[in-house]
Image (spheres, rainbow, N blue to C red):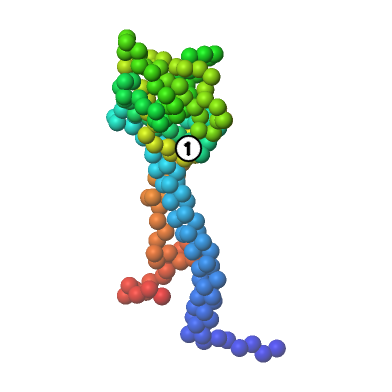
Amino acid sequence: MTTALLAPHTVSTVAGAATRRLRTTAFPAAQVRRLAAGVGRWAVRALVVTALGLFALVAVGPHVLHYRTLTMLTGSMTGTIDVGDVAVVTPLPVDSVEPGMVISYHIPVDDHRLVTHRVVSVEHDAAGSVTVQTKGDANDAEDPWKATLRGDTAWQVRGVVPHVGTVIQWFRAPVVSQALVYGVPVLLAGWLLLSIWRPEADETADGTAPETDPAGATR
């Protein structure tokens, strides 16, 4: 059997070609890893921004801008305020309440729950009390009561934020709230790690740095 020895430059050429083929094959995997890291960073950022926005709307804003947020739980105002929407209400003097306004108040019967309905008529008496008749926009008839507004301030609906109430109710679920207590710190830690970690631009696909010759040129 005849054996041929390869010249040193031939061995180097063959090894270089093999290395290039290895890097070419592994390059897509490295791209996928970098893409996944980027998507992960933006997903965590979006989640954090959304959570902060909801917190600002529900917890901070009412104390700074003097409004209140109420989640619509029934369909009596469907078309104007749907179930799961959040109504933003602001205070106004009770003697400024007029027909056509949508207000939030405690009903004078049963459990005295809070409702948000449209004012149909307003009555003022000599003592300065204001009594309203209301109706839900989606109801066929007026409410079966007349309510005397308590105090000097009424709450008028000024805006509606769609679907946010559903998200808030979901966050209040025991399982979700517990997950948030432990999960948010983990997400924040992951965000910080992803923000700090960056793949080296000169890193090869197999995780090793490229070789350099004594002159400093990269092979």
- Residue found at the very far top of the displayed protein: 127
Q: Which residue is drawn at 47% across and 37% down?
A: 80
Across and down, in percent, residue 9 comes to 48, 85
Camera-side residue: 104 or 165?
A: 104
Residue kind at label 1, given as amino acid type: Thr
Q: Is residue 79 left or right of residue 53?
A: right
Which residue does the numbered mark 1 point to in the structure image? 80
Camera-side residue: 151 or 133?
A: 133
The answer to whether 124 is drawn above or below residue 52 in the figure is above
Across and down, in percent, residue 87 comes to 43, 33
- Quick one: label 1, few (<14), some, or many (20+) residues within 10 Å? some
Across and down, in percent, residue 207 comes to 47, 61
The C terminus lies in which quarter of the figure?
bottom left
Camera-side residue: 208 or 32?
A: 32
Camera-side residue: 27 or 121?
A: 121
The answer to whether 104 is drawn above or below residue 8 in the figure is above
- Residue found at the very far right of the displayed protein: 1
Q: Which residue is drawn at 38% across and 73% down?
A: 218
Q: Residue 214: which quarter of the image?
A: bottom left
Q: Which residue is drawn at 33% across and 32% down?
A: 61
The answer to whether 26 is drawn above or below residue 171 in the figure is below
Q: Which residue is drawn at 50% across and 68% down?
A: 27
The answer to whether 7 is drawn above or below residue 26 in the figure is below
Can I make out residue 62 in this image? no
Can I make out residue 114 in this image? yes
The N terminus lies in which quarter of the figure?
bottom right
SS at circle 1:
loop
